[in-house]
Image (tube, rainbow, N blue to C red):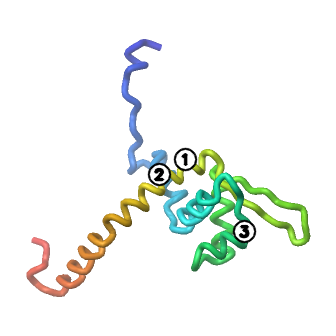
Amino acid sequence: MTSQAKDAPTERGDLFDPACPTRRLLDRIGTKWTSMAVKVLAEAAPGEVRFAELLRRMPGVSRKMLSVTLQNLVRDGLVARRVEPSVPPAVHYRLTALGLSLDTVLAAVRDWAEEHMAEVDRANELSDGQGDRPESAVV
């Protein structure tokens, strides 16, 4: 490898390419249920959270959707699953180191949302309120 090759900037992914790492990640984590599950598990880190507790702390999620979300997070290596051999089995979840690193990124998105969603909502209200008027037509 030449020193020129070592010093060359790493090529960034193309968000419009289905193989782009960013696009692939957003396809995996771009749901509210994934973000909520990661947040609940991050709050418990390094401890574990049982399925029923996750269900209780994520208002509106169905058992099926939570189960699918957790299966995907486990498959992607973001969450570890532990089953206690009891009747019924107790299933525990915790974030892996990779999952904890994702929570840092999602926390930044949550911070941005708390700071700017009022502006986004106002823009929506303005847009919705002007949508019926002829003067609001785009030229």
Amino acid type at mark 1: Ser
Disc 2 to disc 1, how far (Cα)?
A: 7 Å
Looking at the image, which residue is at 66% across and 62% down?
70
In the picture of the structure, the residue carrying the numbered disc 2 is 105
User: Nearer the N terminus, badge 1 or badge 3?
Assistant: 3
Look at the numbered disc 2 and give the secondary structure of its residue: helix
For badge 3, the amino acid type reads Phe
Q: Quadrant of residue 61?
A: bottom right
- Please tell me which of labels 2 and 3 falls first in the chain: 3
Q: Is residue 5 left or right of residue 124?
A: right
Q: Residue, x 42% and y 48% (percent of image)?
A: 17
Which image quarter holds the C terminus?
Answer: bottom left
Say if mark 2 contacts mark 1, CB within 8 Å: yes
How many neighbours does mark 1 have within 10 angstroms: few (below 14), some (14-19), or many (20 or more)? few
Q: Secondary structure at mark 3?
A: helix
Q: Which residue is mark 3?
A: 51
Numbered badge on residue 101:
1
Residue at x-position 55% and y-position 66%? 36
The disc at residue 10 is none
CA–CA distance in space, label 2 to label 3 = 24 Å
Q: Secondary structure at mark 1?
A: helix
Q: From the top left corner, tell me how far across and down residue 53 is, in percent.
A: 69, 71
